[in-house]
Amino acid sequence: MTTVPGQRTAVTVLLVPFALLCLGVFVVPAGYAIYLSFFSTSHSGLGFGTARTVFVGLRNFAVVLTDPSFLRSIGVTLVYIMVFIPLLVAGSLLMALLLDSGLARGRRFAQTVLFLPHAIPGIIAAIIWLYLYTPGISPVLAGLAAADVRIDLLGETLLIPSLVNIALWGGLGYNTVIFYAALQAVPREVMEAAAVDGAGAVRTALRVKVPMVRASVVTVAMFTLVGSLQLFTEPMLLAQATPLVGARFTPNMYIFDAAFNRSNYGLASAASVLLLVLCCLLSYAVARFSSRGARS
């Protein structure tokens, strides 16, 4: 294969900014967190003496892995993921298929309306939903109460669905736009051939369109998985309205509490490293599962 003159230089110039950014915001912080995870701060004189940093090896990791609050936070996050990701991917794909089917009118307007919630900062959206979830001030709950319907959106049963609803509201339209763009790249000849073979609209969507945008579906699922493991903003705000959301409700909240409330940076770093490992393992599992499904 012949090389175009200047190709190597162009590739280098284009990759250097990304490499520097990746090095500065990911590799260096991750390496520093790994380094900190092997150290702890101790005080002499019954805790009143001078603080000194000591090497503790894997002790911080052992403390995190045997801490019931950390294990509980992982469990809560996994339950959240199992509810959120299927709803997000299936809902976004369904809306994208409807937009691509020709049955929907005003596609550009629909895309804009669906995308608008994503343009609202996550913390602002969480505050709005906190207002709608809080008894006594929520017009939604007041309307339901007037109809003699009592519901506790921040109770033990509906807490996870309430968190999922906040994330769905912000992410559904964004991913719909991604899937719709992928569907636009599907060759029209393929769909025309399916129609000639007698396939209806539903069968064409499920047997032709969805398999051809599989790469986009896997990418969205993987990025959503990584983002969901870092759940922080929504439960942090909901903690103001319900005692069920504690300071260590999710792994990121556990890390925040260890670093800024308990000033235990070694413990926070160990938890961060473990969360990074979990993200990598689950992402790898998704990639392997999707590649196996594509081969079959």
Image (spheres, rainbow, N blue to C red):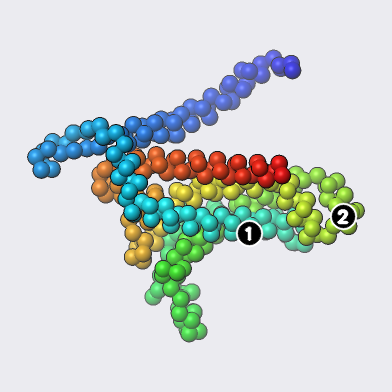
Specify the farthest residue to the right.
196
**Marks 2 and 1 in Cβ contact (< 8 Å):** no
Of residues 69 and 15, the one drawn nearer to the viewer in this rendering: 69
**Count of numbered circles in the view:** 2
Identify the residue under disc 1: 91
User: What x and y, as percent, mark residue 67?
Assistant: 32, 50
Identify the residue under disc 2: 195
Dot 2 alpha-carbon crowd within 10 angstroms: few under 14, some 14 to 19, many 20 or more: some
Q: Residue 184 vs residue 255: left or right? A: right
User: What x and y, as percent, mark residue 227?
Assistant: 50, 48
Q: Residue at x 35, y 46 (%)?
A: 65
Question: Which quadrant is the C terminus positioned in?
Answer: top right
Dot 1 alpha-carbon crowd within 10 angstroms: few under 14, some 14 to 19, many 20 or more: some
Q: Residue at x 32, y 48 (%)?
A: 66
Residue 145 visible? The answer is: yes
Q: Is residue 254 above or below residue 56?
A: below
Question: Which quadrant is the N terminus positioned in?
Answer: top right
Given the image, on which type of amino acid does mark 1 rest? Gly
Specify the farthest residue to the left.
45
Residue 182 visible? The answer is: no
